[in-house]
Image (cartoon, rainbow, N blue to C red):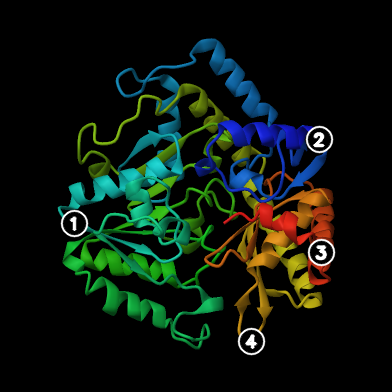
Amino acid sequence: MSRVLEYLGREERVIGRVIGIRFYPIVVERASGSRVFDVDGREYIDFSSQWAVVNLGHNHPEVIEAVRNQLERLIFSSHTSFPNIVAIELAERLVELTPGNFEKKVWFGLTGSDANELIYKIMPIYSGRRRMLGFQGSYHGQTMGALSLSGHKALTRFIGFPNVVKAPYPYCYRCPFKQTYPECGLLCLDFLENSVIENAPAEDLAAVIVEPVQSDGGVIVPPPEFIPTLYRMCRDRGISLVVDEVKVGFGRTGRFFAVEHFNVAPDVISMAKPMASGFPLSAVVGRAEIMDAALAAHLFTSSAHPVSCAASLATINVIQRNGLLERASRMGNHILGRLREIAERHQLIGDVRGMGMILGVELVRDHRAKTPATFEAASLVYRAYELGLLLTYVGTYSNVVEITPPLTISIEDVDRALEIFEKALDDVEKDRVDRESVRRFAGW
């Protein structure tokens, strides 16, 4: 028996299924850069960055050095009552990095879920209004307030809090209004303003929370007019605009924060996954009056952990000093171009889209009907794993293969990964993948 299967058997006996989404049988032992090694010694190119967390690649030496230095000075001090230097320095950097020429303050947590849980709790307190607005397909987290804000099927299966209104996100490939952009005249925005916000009612809406790129919803990039128009709608009605950058921040899209592509300064920004290169850390940066709206309203003993904050400061330094924003834009365009070439050769691909180095390949069984190729997406990801490439799939119909490599990945690894991707796709189209193996590891 392989060590992978041995460990998976041991895991099955002691770790609950509620913790995992599995796409293939892998148990990771070590990683470096864009390469991952399992306990059997097999090597893989990581085209997922572990859900867009290791933007600098695995085990970046500057992050390791920063963590080592911090461990020698201070392993832990609970910022709730005993502030530490590193958290204060990181908060100062985040205030500088986030868009908006107004006074800002920072909150620290551990995950994207607890960051967006703060949004759910604090916005009604600050505004005196009871309701919130989120979008269909959105993924804001697993805790009760965060899942209530969400519109992804993995979260809407739970009964959340009733004070959240949901609106359609501009998913142009599958427009709910059966329109075509740009001839549609952005009917979705008209519907949002006049049929959703005004009937919420607007005077009871505390905030709108939106992902500038909907990631788990299917890597959906909205039309360029969407975020600026949404910002205007909120501003005109005294509604706060909250932007969720948990997955797409810290350089993933070619800007430090994805909302910068739209020249908008939201009232609040939440962030998490890549900000500490794998160490648990989240943050919310918002207008000072919002962040001061209540004392001790959302605190955790391990928030602003000094080791995680040191890792985050190192991450920011590497992104800025090494030109990773420009690299993400340039490499993303290269990957997007290659994927579109592959799409021309394969009928299973219905759409290719993305921004910077978050890209989505939507698989369909029929181009006219756009029938989601859900099992085919699971098969493609499984076959790619067998060939040495780590991918995941997302989307409302679980049919969008998500591509989020480290921003530091070499062009050689990118091109090799795309060769494997097309080989796996070809094997799926020619029914060369073991269906039973795929069914055992069909994710979500």
* Three-letter amino acid code at the position of disc 2: Ser
* Three-letter amino acid code at the position of disc 4: Arg
Of labels 4 and 1, the one closer to you: 4
Frontmost residue, 191 versus 257: 191
Frontmost residue, 231 versus 439: 439
Asked if the residue at tag 2 contacts the one at tag 1, i.e. Cβ–Cβ closer than 8 Å, the answer is no
Frontmost residue, 352 versus 149: 149
Cα distance in 3D space between marks 2 and 4: 44 Å
Asked if the residue at tag 4 contacts the one at tag 2, i.e. Cβ–Cβ closer than 8 Å, the answer is no
Question: Who comes first in sequence, dot 1 or dot 2?
Answer: 2
Q: Which residue is at 27% across, 55% downward?
A: 161
Crowd tier of the residue under label 1, counting other residues whose Cα lies within 10 Å: few below 14, some 14–19, many 20 or above: some
What residue sits right under mark 1 in the picture?
130
Cα distance in 3D space between marks 1 and 2: 55 Å
Question: Who comes first in sequence, dot 4 or dot 1?
Answer: 1
Name the quarter where the N terminus is drawn: top right
What residue sits right under mark 4 in the picture?
368
* Three-letter amino acid code at the position of disc 1: Arg
Residue 190, image quadrant:
bottom left
Question: Who comes first in sequence, dot 2 or dot 4?
Answer: 2
Callout count: 4
